[in-house]
Image (cartoon, helix red, strand yellow):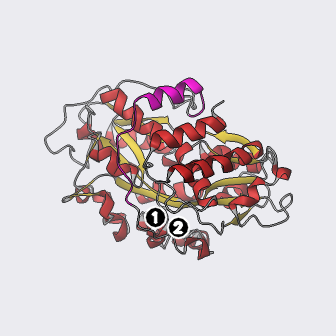
Amino acid sequence: MWCYWRGQKERRQTQLTSIDERLFAERMSRGRVLRLGALGAVGYIASACGGSSSSSSGTGSATGKSDHPVTLNWLTWSDHYANDQLAAVKGKTNEQGRPQLFSDNADAYLKIKQTGSQFDIVSGDALWVPKYHKDGLTESFDLSSLPVSSQLYSIARDFSFWKDGSNYMGYPFSWSTVQIYYNPKFVKTVPDSWHALLDKKYAGKISLENIPTDMMAIAGRATGAKEPYSMTTAEIADAKAWLKQFKPNVLKLASQNNEVVRALADGSAWIGITNLGTDDRVKDAGGPVVKPAYPKEGTIGFIDSEQMVKASKNKDAFARFVNAMEQASYIAQNFITNGRPLFNEKSYKMLVDQGHGDRAQRLLYNQPQKALEMTLKGPSGNEQAYTDAFNEVFGA
């Protein structure tokens, strides 16, 4: 199972360069990513309301209840919360989390950059987190000031790339590799290479999330790029050529990974490219048996977090909201619902006590150190070139 991780510890310093503003307008005009404002009942843009001015420390008390109702606008993924969880946290803290969904880190970054104080919290992956911070879009905080942080695995409190002196740039949430899941009823040969996905018999039968930078990185893995998030011009051209061959086999570029799960469950997709735990989620959805496959060329992975937006007018509410949202009971249920491992060690112990230990161990919940063996998601060294290449294939 772990062979695909070997050789993944390449030295890579992602160039945290500023992304061209025209990238956002181009993405929206081509209508190929988020369809912002149309991602479910909870996803809509609203200005921050009911907040207090920020304190000099950037966070208020992590316990207790807000003196007045606060709405926290949160740019995130669908697997970072549950609606009943948001309702319970509101009752406890007087703070209402209002999620708006996104798919690609690059789009979320530009959204935060362009909207100022419109959002209070933004979720971010791995090496995107220091980019947000370096560019002045997020504010670090004292992780230990949140009592819930004591529930984390110690390794999650010590990621060097998230440290800002004695502060931390984001609250650690979950992690996963991105691999292939396939339905053996239709896929008779294990697809243990990215090139296996180019077979014409899979026309319109592959589902994956609409994350251009990461799709380019996967294409880079497939074509032998040394550093998939910092490809050379020639490597970008090779990745683009691979995507051109791959495109006819794509059923849909999904906005969230639950769409990939549904496509595998209802049989419209035979293959999915997605997170750990998809086999259980498809089974839970009443779908067929699907199996994982690990491409011999290697893959990518994420370590994600919750970040405090620097321009937020509700920074005093951040610690209290996150402290309530990240409690072990919620995280344990999130694992059962969404599959991939998380960084809350206390919730792992709860899962074992509740009879889910085998499932948690199979999905590496108790091995968070594996998260550092992945090629981590991050901004590319030439974001515009990646976007142009992707759009020339999928943006038409």
Q: Is residue 295 above or below residue 379?
A: below
Label 1 element class: helix
Q: Position of residue 90 (x, y in %)?
A: 38, 38
Q: Where, quadrant-wise, is the N terminus in this rendering?
A: bottom right
Start and end of the magenta stretch? 13-33
* 61 sits to left or right of 303: left
Q: Residues within 10 Å of mark 2 (few under 14, many from 20)?
A: many
Q: Amino acid at mark 1?
A: Ser
Q: Where, quadrant-wise, is the C terminus in this rendering?
A: top right
Q: Is residue 70 magenta?
A: no
Q: Amino acid at mark 2?
A: Leu
Question: Which residue matches tag 1?
Answer: 347
- Residue depicted at 49% across the width and 66% down the height: 374
* 314 sits to left or right of 369: left
Label 2 element class: helix
Label 2 and label 1: CA atoms lie apart by 6 Å
Residue sticking out furthest to the front: 234
Question: Which residue matches tag 2?
Answer: 351
Does residue 78 appear anywhere in the picture? Answer: no
Q: Position of residue 307 (x, y in %)?
A: 34, 46
Looking at the image, do the residues carrying marks 2 and 1 touch, with CB atoms under 8 Å apart? yes
Q: Position of residue 202 (x, y in %)?
A: 82, 51
